[in-house]
Image (cartoon, rainbow, N blue to C red):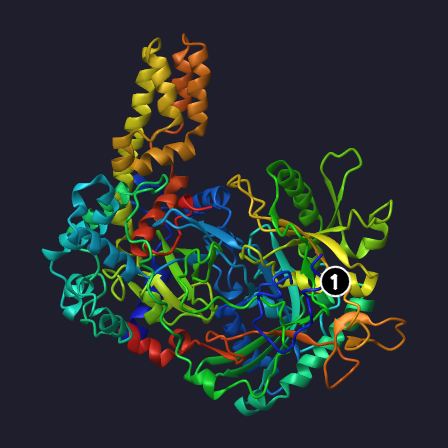
Amino acid sequence: MASSSSSPSPSAPNDTATASNILQFSPLPTQISADFWHALSTLKLDRLRLNEAPLPLRGEYGVARRVKDRKTGEVVAVQGTLALAEGSLEAVDARGQAGPPLEATSSSQPFSASSNRPLSVPAYGTLLNYNTAVAFTSADKNALFNSQADEILSNLLHSPEPLRDAVLRFTILAYADLKKHKFYHWAALPALVAKPGWSLQGGGWSAIEEEQGEKMSEALREHVERYKGTCDAGFALVRQKEKGEGYHLGRITDYVSFYPGGVEESEPPTVLFIDPSSHDSAPGWPLRNLLNLFAVRWGVKKLRAVCWRDELSSTSTGTSASLMGTVFLPTDNASSTGGLVQPEGSPSPLPLAQLASFPARPAAVGWERNAQNKLAPRVADLGPLMDPHRLADQAV
Amino acid sequence: MNAIQTHFWAVRDYLAPVLRESKFKEHGRITPDEFVAAGDFLAYKFPTWSWSSGDASKTRDFLPKDKQYLVSKGVPCLRRVSQMERAALGTKRKGAASSSTAQTDERLLSFAEGKDGIDVTGAGGEDDWLATHLDDEGQGASNAEVGEIEDMPDAPPEADSLTAGQEDDLASRIAGTSLGDDDDDRDDGGEVGDIPDMDDEDEEAMAGAGVVEHEDPSALAPPPKAAPTTSAGGSNILSVRTYDCLISYDKYYQTPRMWLVGYDEHGSPLKPAQIFEDISSDYAQKTVTIEPFPHSATLNTASVHPCKHASVMRKVIERMDASVKEEQKRLRTKQQQGGEGEEASVDDAAAPTSSTKKKKWGLGGAMKKVANRSTSSAAVATSDSSDSPGDATTSLVEVEGLRVDQYLLVFLKFMASIVPAIEIDATQSF
């Protein structure tokens, strides 16, 4: 109904009026803990030395945490973050040196950074740690980012593990000033830009009914238990059981075989994902590439999405924060031939925007903004917590 | 100086024998085994807490390998302590103290007033914190001062931590905290001040170097900075500080010890001066100091020094224990009365929020609620067959008073008074 309004408008960044139906995704902030930097400095000093090769990383995110403000009595949600901790570098540590990205997600070694929260989803990425500030500043970040986008597209199309390799793949650029204990870093969580953008159907997001939520929660608990520690824990296909009792959850990659009767136009496939966002109407970043996965791999242009935002623990409040809505790719015929990505050997163009300068490349977004909302690196100053001289001054 | 002291503590810690005998009610200390039991209970009741094994080279042999310390990650901290204190003082000035809703505000005040008569050893202008907070204009200046580390007298830290009078105040305050829904509104809605800007000179220097983002209508624009942080435009989105809270076992003091690692709104680690903003001003830089975390090779972080934990815990436990026992006794006698008392006893068991009890011994009552859910159901069961009160009594005997595995719940209440803004007290949130 609203396909006309979703004109691709690269010129106006804040035309919220016309783009009201465009689905907006809430970016996933990274949270790098102090012990991650401790682990990195140790690794750098003892093992890596001047080696600048990319390091594999493993982070984690979960649903937004809800707390009750003791002052106002309101329930406030604290957005979920992509957390990196000491154990995020473990894959490197075991090998003794930088290696290729992890081969298997089948959690062979315990992941000590893992929080005990039942709903935590791993995400895999790369750390590029530069030796000097100059190298960090002058690195060709655009090229890096674009090659990431390329990789993501090809993984979306062909990888046997698209969730791990593409859906939430991140890169962190870093420069560790080991003398001053300052860590400059900049994260990128590239997401391919769909063209025209994903839109939300009429009714918008609606809350999940209690009974429905309970049944889904049950099925999800089972699913999470089965795929614990892998990316599959965070995403699932949903199907109602034949007798209407409860739900059946399956892996995203089983899409082709999951719906026995095939998918009809009136009853689009349902995906569930663990949503770190706490925003009322914007689902979290992981959904973005997940939708692209459906679009480019299976040509699905309409989906029902369940943004799962509740803890699975027994101390539930009764009110569910999870959302449900139908999203679709508007069939915008005007621009469909120009400006879409057409990878080699592909018969038809994919519904993704391309970079102006490189016609075959998908456009992507996802650089993390700093505290001032600018595209710039951040700094973690651990001097006060690590520098022995300053510690001595401080606590005398 | 600090290094020497830290080494001294390390040696003393090494030499101290491991406590074997359980005496937690007599002097507030617990054995490692009890620490593990209490930790298990905490992790079971509130799954945000979990055990961690820590650095392998720092494993303490008197604790199980996989249960070296407790950790709760990402604990939100909604506002700065100064805002809370100022808010409390504000209500006082309006003379609203007469109403019962001012009760929670009173806590901070009475504590502050109790301090007046006590000799705080030469902490300079720190005694005057009450005055600085009263003066709203001076707020900015006093905040800036936190950044500077004040010189402390060379006396051992024990001397300038809690005095006996303070302990009493503290104990009574904690025992008085209510566990139930803290619905007493403090009328300071919208008091949330501006979050101080991060110092960004370094970042500007390392600027984005020509990175361009593709125009993206699908990315949610971050909320404008000036917007109030709570429930802006119906969306309950919040960017708040978070803390990783760690509880280790201190062998020398034989008590748990709280450690805090803070992160700002954007996930960057906090500097100590910023951590102190979340610590009640009576403790910042006195009982709370930056020290090496015992289960990590490199991490130094803020910790509440445990030198007075035992005596405070003893006082709190004493009071709560008494109230728990009293409650149990009352329950028991009511049951034995049977007949017309029956209804009332069931009511009490189901809702231990009878107004006066809640105010004064709310914690005790709620503890009972946590621990004795079985007893209340037992009470219901016996009310069916009213001629067998003996059964109820026996089921009550096994939980006479406070159990040692509830120690850490009490401990968290105690810590919550030192770091009032950090929601470590999981019993109030979910």
Quick one: quadrant of the N terminus of chain B?
bottom left
Q: Residue at x 44, y 18 (%)?
A: B380
How far across and how far down the image is residue B176, in percent? 26, 41
Q: Identity of the amino acid at label 1?
A: Pro
Find the residue positioned furthest to the left: B117
- Vertical placement of residue A211 versus A91, above or below: above
Q: Is residue A97 visible?
A: no
Please state the horizontal and vertical placement of residue A387, each as a whole percent of the image. 39, 79
Q: Is residue A211 above or below residue B58?
A: above
Residue at 34% from the left image edge and 76% from the top image edge: A391
The chain letter under disc 1 is A
- On screen, residue A366 versus residue A251, left or right, reads left
Within-10-Å neighbours for mark 1: few <14, some 14–19, many 20+ = many
Q: On the picture, is A211 further left or further right than B280?
A: right
Q: Is residue A327 above or below residue B324?
A: below
Q: Which residue is mark 1?
A: A330
Judged from the image, the secondary structure of the residue bearing numbered disc 1 is loop
